[in-house]
Amino acid sequence: MEGDTLTLRNVLLDEKIVNVDICDAKIKQVAVSEEQSGTSVEQDGVSLFSFPSLLSVFPGLCNMHSHAPMTLFRGLGDDQPLDVWLNSYIWPAEQKLTDELVYKGTLQACHEMLASGTTAFNDMYFRLPAMAQAVRDSGIRAMLGFNIFGDGDKLECVNTLMCDCEGVRFSIAPHSIYTVSEKGLRRCADVCASLHLPMHIHMSETQKEVDNCLHEHGCRPWEYLDRLGILDLLGDNIIAAHCLHLSENEIKLIGDHRITCVHCPNSNLKLGSGYRFPMLELLDAGARVTLGTDGSASSNNLDMIEVMKTAALLQKGWRGDPTVVPAQKILSLATLGHSIAAGQPACLFLAEVKSLSDLIYASHGDSVAVTLVDGKITHSRTSSKATTP
Ligand SMILES: [Zn+2]
C-alpha cells in the first residue's frame, strides 16, 4: 500500500541533516545523515521526489477551528461587522447550499490545508456526510462538528449522522451562546456526555456577545456555561473558538476545567473582534491553547503558517515584549505538541525553508512542498522554488 515504507532523505531538523524512516503510519527512526546532497522522498529505495536544496521537516499543523465548506464564500461580505456579516451575507447564502456544493467546498478546503502543511482540522458545519466524503477522498484527518442552533431539535438524528460519517471523528457543535437556547445548550452537553463526544463552540468572540450575556443572564459567557453545569459535566472535552474577551474569573474557570481554547487571530482581526487574546494568562491558568484559521469567508485563507505568524506578532505587539511566544512555542501550539521523533504519527510536512524561524516569520503556506498524513503522501509539489541565499 502506498506510503507504508517511506524515507525522507537529507532533511533539516533543528539545524541538523537527518533521514526520517516512516513505516505503518508512524515515524520509525530519525538518524543523522552523512550526505550533503538535496532532499529526496524515497519509497522502498526508489526516489519519488527530489529537490536540489535541503528542505526542513516539521510536524503537521492542526487547524483547530474551521468551517471548511466556506471556501465557497471567500470574499463574500468582506469588511462588515460580525453580526451584519452573519445575518446579511453568510446565513442567507448557506440556505442555498446542497450536499454537492458542501462536498466541493470541503474538498477545496482539504486540498488547501494539505498544500499549506495542515494534516488535521477541527470543523463546525452541517451536511456532515458530504463533508466526511471529501475528508476521506483527500486523505486529511478531521473532526467534524454537528452544528446546532436554537433548542437543538436536530440532535435527534445524531446517531444516524455519526453512522453516515464513518472514518472521521465527530463532535457536537452548538454554534454559540447567542444562537443556541439554554435548553439547546443543555441538550448538547447531555449528548456529548452520553456519547463521549467533544463539544465545539464559539465563545467570547466579541464584546457585544459579553454585553448581551450580562444583560440577558446577569453574568459573563463562561459564567453562564458554568451555571448551566456544562463546565463540570464536560470539562476538558470542550473546544472553544476565540475566547478573546475574558475576565479573570472566566480565565480561572477555563483553566480549572482544562478547556481547549482556539485562537483565530486573522479572523478576529478582519472582523474587528479584538486582538488581546490572553494566551499567556490562559496557559498559566491550565487551559490548552491551540490555533485555527476560522472559515475562509472570514480569514480568508486556511494558511496555518500565516496564523502562527499573526498570533506570535500580536502577543509581542500588544504586550510590548518581543520575547514572549517565541517560534518554538507557537509551533507547539499549532501542532498540539507533536514532534518529529520515533513513535510519533507520520503526519508532517517538508517546507522550502532553512529553519523554524524562516517558516514562521519569513514564509507562507506556499513554502510547503510535500505533506504526509499517517505516512501517506497527500500533497506534493515537485517544481522546486529557487533556493533562498
Ligand atoms: Zn468560527
Image (cartoon, rainbow, N blue to C red):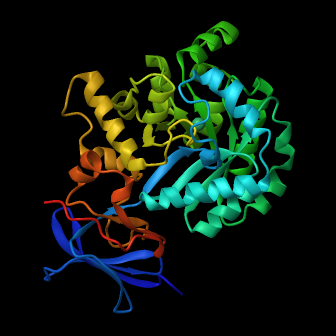
Q: x and y percent of residue 334 in the render?
A: 40, 49
State whether residue 226 appears in this view: no
State whether residue 255 appears in this view: yes
Which residue is pictured at 74% across the width and 28% down the height?
A: 180
* 377 to the left or right of 37: right
| In this view, 245 is above or below 354 | above
Q: x and y percent of residue 260 in the render?
A: 50, 40
Q: x and y percent of residue 201 in the render?
A: 62, 35
Which residue is pictured at 73% across the width and 53% down the height?
A: 101
Q: Quadrant of residue 28?
A: bottom left
| In this view, 343 is above or below 43 | above
Which residue is pictured at 65% across the width and 49% down the height?
A: 69
Q: x and y percent of residue 175 in the render?
A: 68, 34
Which residue is more in the foreground, 94 or 386? 386
Which residue is more in the foreground, 69 or 160? 69
Q: Quadrant of residue 210?
A: top right
| In this view, 84 is above or below 125 | above
In which quadrant will I find the N terminus? Answer: bottom right
Q: Quadrant of ligand 1?
A: top right
Which residue is more in the foreground, 246 or 87? 87
Q: How many numbered marks, from 0 up?
A: 0
Give the residue at the far bottom of this rendering.
Answer: 45
| In this view, 345 is above or below 203 | below
* 141 to the left or right of 345: right
In which quadrant will I find the C terminus? Answer: bottom left
Which residue is more in the foreground, 137 or 32? 137
